[in-house]
Amino acid sequence: MAQRNVYSSKGEPEDAQSAEEVLHSVMQELDALHENVKGQLNQDITRLQTEKNHLIEDIEDLREQYRKLQSQQMESLSGRYIQQQQLWLKQLAQVLAHNLQDLLVQRFNELSANSGNSLSSPIPSGEFPIPLPPSNYDERASQLLAALDERIDRSFQMLEQDLTSYESELSVRLNNMKTLELQGEELLQNLVNRIREELEEEEEYLENPFDAQDSYVEESTNSLNSVRPQLLQPPTPAETPREPVPQPSSAPPTAPAKVASQVQTGLVLALSSAVVLSLFNVCLRILIKSKNPRMVFGLFEFPGVVTPGFGNSLLILLMRLIVVMALMPILATFLYPSVWKDIRRLFQSGDRALWSKVLGSAFFLFLSQVLIYLAIGNIPAGIAITIFFIYPIVTVLGSWILFGSRPTTVGFLAIVGITAGLILAGWPSFAAPPPDGGNVGVGVAAALASGITFAGYVLLTQMAAGKLHPIPFSLVNFAAIFVFSSLSLWVPLSDNFSPKIDQNVWPGLIIGGVVLGVLTLFSYLLNNFAIRFAGAALASVIGTLGPALTALFAFIIINENLQPVAILGMAVVTLSVAAMSVERIMAPQKKAS
């Protein structure tokens, strides 16, 4: 584009011809990119169409099985009813035969008595009588047949009534089966519609894999910003106004509020994460050499391993990241099983805007870590972390400029409080040189620069938070920082910026890198579970205790004293940052009310 503007500013014909050649080459590249993207999308659509055909075949198989089961059930029911009817007819025939036999015996006895030719004894039931003479036979036979017809009519009427009741019962059961069939068809139709919707959503996702509809909830975005590798939690992205994401009407209801026990557990885990991060800062302070050897727990002296400097800070960061990159993939897979799937989608997306934000945030975080290492090596750890807390001011002002998120009254008061606290915390370091012999100017400047670069990391993270899950985002960040550290040490540096390491201190440096890496991963794990239980907002409030805890552990472990003015400034900074965090927690409740 720069070349095209230069050529367009000249009126010579050969310049116009060069511009046409550049435009032609750009059009060829765009056509090639279009063909490449189109080929990939065609492959994905073909694969999805194949899967859709397979699903349709499976649905047809399910319907066929349902029809077979229905026919088998009908056959079994009809067979049972036929057997039952045959049994009823057999019982009815037996009853009719028995009644007919009793009736015949009774009529023959009556005929014998009336004719005067009765037998010496009545005919017992179940035996046939002796035939009567032909006199009055026709009349008695007619009466007997009439009685038999009446009895048979009554029997058939009873049988008809029974058959009618059985028919009505069978009709009710058939209606129930028809209702079940309709319900089954409706279920299958819902299943087909759901599968079709999922396929359409997947096709839309392939067309734009990082669309705004894939944004994660605010807690997930906050967790990305809350996993500060060696310091404390940055402000949550609630400061950044984001366009509302349209939610489907069939979205499930929001989860109920966390129970009190879960919140308490999350707060304990967040406090534990802050303690581990403070121990990380103190261990880093011990690892760097000072003018006088430091007394650890008042038991033994430790002279340190490396001298404070930019190159040595790079080397410490690289040693720590070797341990982190060896264990972080395992930890990321445990916390989020789909981490590798998301990273593969990120590489396949070709989203240059997202990549620029991810790599830009990693570069700012890389600079922030190197500078804070340099600051902790020159001034007390508690003072360095307190000065580092200038990043909320820069983040709020940057959000105001970039996103139009104007700070509230509480935000402005917190900015004033943080500024006053930073002045109070840093003033004693300039008034009296530190006993360890560090360069106060370099330490304070490095801490300020670390906070400013960390604010850049937070702002870029807010821009990319809705398009990538926090855990794969953190893993890519760690990998990028590892690459930046390796390249920085590989590039020749001047004497003032190159590493200065004695050959005899390599074992201590390796052990220190392992300790720092383990503390980093341990704090990452604790902070992740703290956000799951208590939420990122409450976890960020606990994270504001970082400067105070760092100063406390520095006093306990290496007897690093701070002047009362510095402690007052640290308290003012901590309360101001905590007020900003609490104000972010209360803001959604005020809007809802």
Image (cartoon, grey):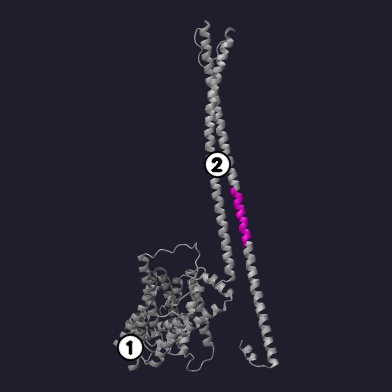
Residue 238 lies, in percent from the top left, at: 43, 75
Q: Is residue 185 visible?
A: yes
Above or below — where is 530 with respect to 510? Answer: above
Q: Which of 6 and 339 is in front in this view?
A: 6
Residue ID at (68%, 83%): 24
Residue at the spot 52% in from the left edge and 72% down from the top edge: 212
Please provide percent x and percent y for residue 114: 51, 7
Give amino acid for label 1.
Leu
Residue 451's image quarter? bottom left
Is residue 574 covered in magenta?
no
Marks 2/1: CA–CA distance: 88 Å
Q: Which secondary structure is most common in the magenta stretch?
A: helix
Residue 17 sits in quarter: bottom right
The question of residue 58 being in magenta is answered with: yes
Q: In which quarter of the image is the C terminus?
A: bottom left
Whether residue 530 is situated above or below residue 375 in the rendered picture: above
First in sequence: mark 2 or mark 1?
Answer: 2
Secondary element type, mark 1: helix
Q: How crowded is mark 1: few (under 14 residues within 10 Å), some or many (20 or more)?
A: many
Say which residue label 1 marks. 424
- Which numbered mark, 2 or 1, is in the foreground of this view? 2
Q: Name the residue under label 2.
A: 174
Residue 299 in sight: no
Q: Which residue lies furthest to the top in this view?
A: 116
Residue 344 is left or right of residue 533, and the answer is right
Q: What's drawn in magenta, residue-wise? A: 51-66
Q: Where is residue 113 in the image (x, y as percent from the top left)?
A: 51, 8
